[in-house]
Image (cartoon, helix red, strand yellow):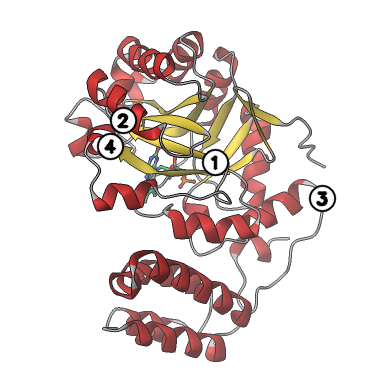
Amino acid sequence: MFKNKSKLKIGNLKLASRVLLAPMAGITDYPYRKLYRQFGCKTAFTEMINARSLTHLSKKTMQMLYTDKEDSPLGVQLVGNDPEYITGAIKELHKMDFDFIDLNAGCPVKKVVNNGSGSALLKNPEKLARILKIIKANTDLPVTVKIRTGWNRENKNSAVIAKTLSEAGADAISVHGRTKAEMYRGSVDYQSIKQAVDASSVPVLASGNIFTPQQVKNMFQKTGCAGVLVARGSYGNPCIFNDIHAYLSGKPLPAIRPAAKVGDIMYMHLNYIMDFYGNDPGYKIYRKHINHYTRYFTHAKGLREKVFRSTRPEDIQDIIEEFKETAACYRHPYLASV
Ligand SMILES: Cc1cc2nc3c(=O)[nH]c(=O)nc-3n(C[C@H](O)[C@H](O)[C@H](O)COP(=O)(O)O)c2cc1C
């Protein structure tokens, strides 16, 4: 049995689990975290937040920053590279309630990279370390950095970056096991993650293709990482956190998940979203999640088509009701394999 013994510490922050919810723009908003925390997710990150937007707080930015007492521990993720904006952003963050600050050095999106931020920083470890030091000099909160394995296959440098960042004062480093060029496609480079683990004097959290509890165990074993981030594997499956914890401690997983139970979770998620954003646009924001919830059920395809024709919050409620009544029990790939 895999032993998940030692507790994960980020600076002076002790975490209850070594499995965290990864930052995901457009996904890990307050309603998502509120829901997932009820199913075993202990530590989470906000969506990526632009340091410059933090210096003039729009309604959208305030929504992205919203949190409460139960939504903790929580890391707020900043993206940017301008010392002035970063310093201003940290001042604003100190008025709010975050447990740690994460710097994004992995985002591959053109708009971010062209501005010298996100994964563009992988090409310049010294500059990345300078930004980290500015953050550290302006906060007492633990500071983490999320990187990729490098810019492209020819320029993998996770070990150099991990060493540079840990020497510059990072309290933990997350490594997404793909290069910027790979975006989100293909296999994960365990060896580059392991090299970062070996080069770093602080905990390394690993990310990439975590869709099943077995893949979490595999990630720990292959890389020696201190923690694992669950990203797309959390889509439509809040129970994955409880499932991972059960699997790692040798307990059995449920063989099937009834539609009625998943339907109840879908309702909770819809209500959290509508409470937070308002019924409209809430129900529109929710639509993307329904595909994920229903993916592994038979007889649910017709429902998914209805979702995209829906024009009112009540339409979504009707669809969930119909789903609960008509969808057959499903087998998630990992539930089927145990
Ligand atoms: C829709 C989406 C949004 C993401 N947004 C962020 C982000 O804001 N910040 C970040 O550091 N990583 C972001 N990521 C990357 C994830 O945190 C994770 O590292 C990546 O998806 C690899 O894990 P996976 O293969 O298990 O999904 C995002 C990924 C997805 C799919």
> Label 2: which residue?
89
Circles 4 and 2 in contact, beta carbons < 8 Å: yes
Res 15 quadrant in image: top right
> Label 1: which residue?
229
Spatial CA distance of label 2 from label 1 is 25 Å
Looking at the picture, which amino acid does disc 2 mark? Ala
Please tell me how crowded label 2 is: few (under 14), some (14-19), or many (20+) other residues with Cα within 10 Å.
Answer: many
Helix, strand or loop for disc 4: helix
Q: Earlier in the sequence, mark 3 or mark 1?
A: 1
> Height in image: 135 above or below 4?
above
Please tell me how crowded label 3 is: few (under 14), some (14-19), or many (20+) other residues with Cα within 10 Å.
Answer: few
Q: Earlier in the sequence, mark 2 or mark 3?
A: 2
Spatial CA distance of label 2 from label 3 is 43 Å
Q: Earlier in the sequence, mark 2 or mark 1?
A: 2
Looking at the picture, which amino acid does disc 1 mark? Leu
Q: Is mark 3 within 8 Å of ligand 1?
A: no
Q: Give the residue drawn at x 50%, y 20%.
A: 140
Q: Earlier in the sequence, mark 4 or mark 2?
A: 4
> Height in image: 53 above or below 105?
below
Which of discs 4 and 3 lies nearer the camera? The answer is 4
Which of discs 2 and 3 lies nearer the camera? The answer is 2
Q: How far across and how far down the image is residue 44, in percent?
A: 53, 44
Spatial CA distance of label 4 from label 2 is 5 Å
Which of discs 1 and 4 lies nearer the camera? The answer is 4
State the mark number for residue 250: 3
Helix, strand or loop for disc 1: strand
